Amino acid sequence: MSPTKKIITIFGATGSQGGSVANIFLHDTKLDAEWTVRAVTRDIQKEKAKTLAANGAEVVSADLNDKSSLLAAIKGSTAVFAVTNYWEKLDKSLEVQQGKNLVDAAKEAGVEHFIWSSLLDINKLSGGKLPHVYHFDGKAEVEEYARSVGLPSTFFLAGCYMSNFPGQNFRFDKDNNKWTYSLPVPGTAIIPVFDVDDTGKFVKAAILHKDQTLGKRLLGATKYMTANELVERFKKAFPEAGKTASYQQLPEEVYKNILKGAGMPEFVAQELLENMLLLDSFGYYGKESLDWTHSLLEDKLTTWDEFVKKTPLWKDLK
């Protein structure tokens, strides 16, 4: 490890967001000249961890529930990228505690730039009309905590993962021989589409423009697109497979029953329903423009057209 380089500690480095951040810091010439990557994971023996080590990262283990292990992982770092995973335990209070542990450790270690993977407080944004979007509200609570303790922070807000579209809501109906994109909102609902592999591009912008981004939110999306537009672009990408593709608005209870039929608990089905309803009501980002965030980026973002051609589930479509 070069003593002249600053350390960025990346949590969730073997996951989607953290993996993207690690990748850009290891392979971007400008970043690699200035920064050393400390990749944090629970299991340093997993293949992704070994790959990170082979690419030059210092790989360390830490437990989000153990503040002392977080402090040990962060010690000596100039910057930290931190992310938690609500979906692992489906427990908002646990996620908030893990996030606060990260904030406390970063504060105690004297971190100069803490980049938190946050989201908006939807209960507050909606005036209590959408009170169950826990995976947003928990991250927002941690953001508020980081602000309250005076930790120098930038907040990265990931958009709707493009990787969640194929197979989840955008499916092929064998009985009718057609593709249908189905959500419990009108086709005019506005979706901030985001390729999770682009996470590192936003974090790079936060690091390079630290003075401009401290205390601010970076909106992690390529573009706002309607559900109808997503289907139309799919049809253009795959003229044969997509010729009968269409958008279908599902009744709310039908959508929830589909989720429950897939094994999701009632509270999770309600949470995901409200997450979808947000798109056509208060807006995923409260209807804020993406322009300021985009003005800070040096790297081109992945478009929906590019994603549909590269995603493994659709790679064989014509």
Image (cartoon, grey):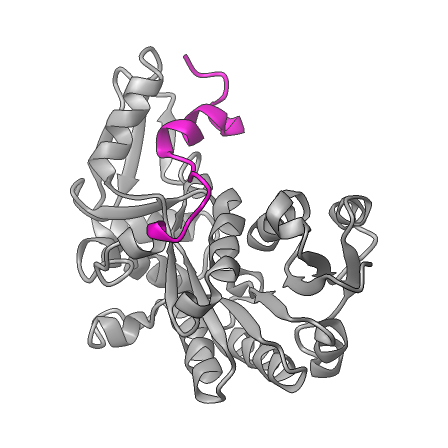
List x then y, in percent, for residue 312. Answer: 53, 27
Residue 35 placement (x, y as % from top left): 68, 58
Which quadrant is home to the C terminus? top left
Please indicate whether residue 19 sits to the left or right of residue 203 in the image. Answer: right
Q: Residue at x 35, y 55 (%)?
A: 293
Q: Nearer the viewer, residue 246 or 280?
A: 280
Q: Position of residue 298 (x, y in %)?
A: 45, 45
- The quarter in which the N terminus is drawn is bottom right
Which residue: 55% across, 75% down?
A: 99
Asked if the stretch drawn in magenta spans residue 305, the answer is yes
Percent across and percent down for residue 83 are 56, 64
Please tell me whether residue 35 is drawn above or below residue 163 in the rendered image.
Answer: below
Q: Is residue 298 above or below residue 288?
A: above
Look at the image and say whether residue 267 sits in the magenta stretch: no
Q: Looking at this view, is 196 or 276 the one in front?
A: 196
The magenta stretch is 294-318
Observer able to see residue 77: yes
Which quarter of the picture shows residue 281? Answer: bottom left
User: Which residue is pictured at 35% across the width and 25% down the height?
Assistant: 173
Q: Is residue 176 visible?
A: no
Q: Residue at x 48, y 52 (%)?
A: 263
Query: Viewer-proximal residue, 234 or 21?
Result: 21
On screen, residue 138 above or below 238: below
Judge from the rendering whether residue 91 lies leftward or rightward of residue 168; answer left or right: right
